[in-house]
Amino acid sequence: MAQTSDSLATRLAITHYDFDPDSANATDVAWVDMNGFDKIIVSFFRTVGTGALDTFALIGNSASDGSGTDVTLVTHAVGSEPDAVGDYIFLECNVQQMAQEAADSGNDVRYVSVSAEFATATDEGVVTYIRSATRAYDGLTADSIA
């Protein structure tokens, strides 16, 4: 039996972002295109600090740089804080939810980003995006080495 070495890597686009905004203001992590994808799950993993994560939301926008009107797609419940190094939380959304929130707000949604806000500006974490493709593509998930 032949073994496939990259079957998940052709269906999932996985990207990690170092989240160190040096700010206690809500910050958009990275805008990604949902065209060709039907689901997204994002996570926050605490690496530095013990302060609250005041906001952890998945937002949508019609503009690839977030310059349009933001639409809140899903937010993490208050009171379930990842307030120790090694804590992590998740948010998940599918295109049907995105379409419903877009219709409810009267705005288009094609691009999504995590919006996160630390209570303490020196806290840090890693945000991971995992998007599920509607069909297999070679190289959806690839190594990134600087």
Image (cartoon, rainbow, N blue to C red):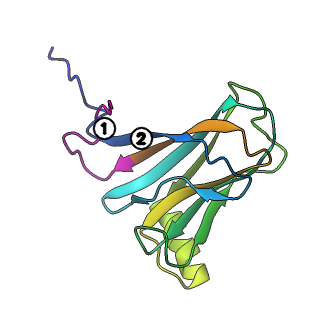
The one of 129 and 23 positioned closer to us in this rendering: 23
Query: Which class describes the residues within 10 Å of circle 1: few (<14), some (14-19), or many (20+)?
Result: some
Within-10-Å neighbours for mark 2: few <14, some 14–19, many 20+? some
Q: Position of residue 140 (x, y in %)?
A: 27, 42
Residue 85 lies, with reference to residue 124, above or below; the image says: above
Which SS type dominates the magenta stretch? loop
Magenta part of the chain: 132-146
Farthest residue to the left: give it: 2
- Tag shown at residue 15: 2
Q: Residue at x 71, y 58 (%)?
A: 25
74 shown above or below 109: above
Residue drawn at (47%, 78%), measured in percent from left and top? 108
Q: Is residue 98 left or right of residue 22?
A: left
- Residue 133 shown left or right of residue 71 in the figure: left
Q: Which residue is mark 1?
A: 141
Instruction: State left or right for residue 85 relative to residue 69.
Output: right
Looking at the image, residue 20 lies above or below residue 115: above
- Which residue appears at 49% of the width and 69% of the height? 66
Q: Regarding mark 1 in the picture, which secondary structure is present there? A: loop
Badge 2 amino acid: Thr
CB within 8 Å, label 1 to label 2: yes
N-terminal-most mark, 1 or 2: 2
Does the magenta segment cover residue 69? Answer: no
| Label 2 element class | strand
Q: Is residue 25 left or right of residue 107?
A: right
Give, as a three-letter code, the residue at label 1.
Answer: Thr
State which quarter of the image contains the C terminus: top left
